[in-house]
Amino acid sequence: MAHPDISWIAALNQLTAGFFLLCSFGLIAAAQVTGCIRFYVLQSLLLACSAVLLGIRDHSTDLFIAAGIYIAAKVILIPLLLKRTARQEMIARRELSQVIGVPSSLLIALGLTLVAYYIALPLTIHAGGGARTNLPIGLAAVLIAVYTITVRREALPQMLSLLAIENGAFFAGDAIAPAFPLIGELAGTFDVLMIVLVLGVLSTQVHRSLGNTAVGSLSQLGEE
Amino acid sequence: MLRMILYNLLQVLVVLLASPLAVGVLNRLKERVQSKHGSSIFQVYRDIWKLFCKDQVLSDQSTWIFRLTPYLVFAAPIVVTLLIPVLTSYPLFFAFMGDMLGAGFILALAGFFAALAAVDSANPYGAMGASRTRMVGFLAEPVFMVVFFTVCFVANSTIPYIVQQTWIHPFANFFDPSHVLIAIAFFMLILAETGKIPVDNPSGHFELAMIDESKSLEFSGAGAALVKWGGCMKFFVLLCVFLNVLIAPWGLAAGKAPAAVVLAIPLVLLKVLGAIMLITAVESSLAKLRLFRITAFLGLALVVAVAAMLARMMHI
């Protein structure tokens, strides 16, 4: 860590991690679907940034390629697919409803972040700087995204939180296993693309038959 | 020593004279963005001058609080100016009289009396505005506290002159997540505390929707001028804290020669112009929040501030 370049990269990586966490909070607080999508794209971009920074530090070309995959799939393709499969009314929807209000949700998310730190920090005592930053933040992002899925009522924000879980997992994973085989990275990303496609079509169907996508009202089987 | 006192007074002079200009530029920029022609950037000076020339009307039902408040609102930012770095990056004569917490208390005192005076005037809009300001105030309070805690953690001091140096020594500190997150949280606080758009609409003339403005509706003549001027100075002082203490001390005078200090004035004004452009962008791109959405806005600010503190505590 004595090398000045490395301390710079570590600082920048920490900054990226901070903003990454903020995007998770943004996904909870955003009141519109477009806002959610924007936060998701930003978070994916930060994921790619972090991968590039870690790649520079570890001289790992794998991470550069991974960053390229993230940008291609998450920053460009997923929003595009969402906009194509989901209906315009679903995207343009304002005033999303939540089970728990935004301020209390934010406080709970803060608590989750603390939990993530308490779990993850002891694991990283012997690890390098990258894992010390990325593992707690990635875990926090996963927990917050799970929480977001449970409080959001509409399908599209839930879907974006599902994708955010995957973002968090990759954020932590990039630091722990920089030499993760690229084929796995690719497979994971394509899986996610498929998920977006399927969920987009599904939620559009739900929207068509129900008029909204409040998943809570799907708890009973109806007869035509 | 005498020179330090003189520089300190020069700071006050800069804040006194430049703050209406800052507000005027902000108003003009906002109107230009909305494709209006907009009033002159010197309009605020003219308003203040006009108000000073007018008679003051005092209700005989009001108490001493109503008479005292304009002076307090005017004096509080001046006292704070003595404590914070406006032009120089080294401590001046009064620098150790109080820290950032002290400055916050002084501004809070002025805010408290402004709210009391609004209730004292018995204008229904005044009391409504006062209670709303208090609501925003107590939501902003925890954010303030967490920001101060974090600054203490990072800089081991709450004296603004010492704090400002820690961000760039070494320069990698500048990219420290806690630094950037604190700056974001404090910026959101400035928007809330000075009644800017996501929280309050400063150019609205509809009393029912007002938060900050309605407290000063009952003041007239010199009192109104002082309150208006005090509001401008509060805005300018908060911007100075944001730019010089929390972002970075660039453009401040490092040398003790008078020329360096005088040269710092245009540089600081340039920085303030940059911050004003940022505020214009925020105010023009966001809509005013409903009153009960403000909790979400300030809740987000609190989360940002706590994330900054977490980043600091966990990465030591």
Image: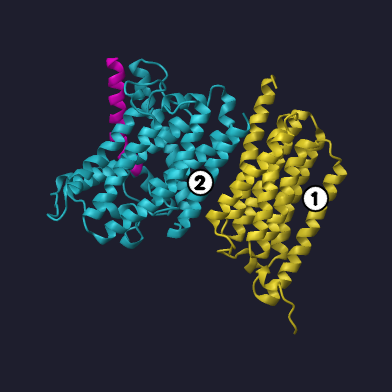
Residue A139 in magenta stretch: no
- Rounded to the nearest whole Å, what is the CA distance between mark 1 and mark 2? 33 Å
Residue pictured at 69% horizontal, 25% vertical: A6
Q: Which residues are magenta?
A: B1-23
The picture's colour for chain A is yellow
- Residue nearer the viewer, B285 or B208: B208
Mark 2, residue position: B301
Residue pictured at 58% horizontal, 56% vertical: A30
Residue pictured at 34% horizontal, 55% vertical: B131
**Residue B113, which numbered label?**
none
- Residue nearer the viewer, A146 or A212: A146
Label 2's element? helix
Q: Are marks 1 and 2 in contact (CB under 8 Å)?
A: no
Residue A145 x %, y %: 67, 52
Q: Main secondary structure of the magenta part?
A: helix
Mark 1, residue position: A189
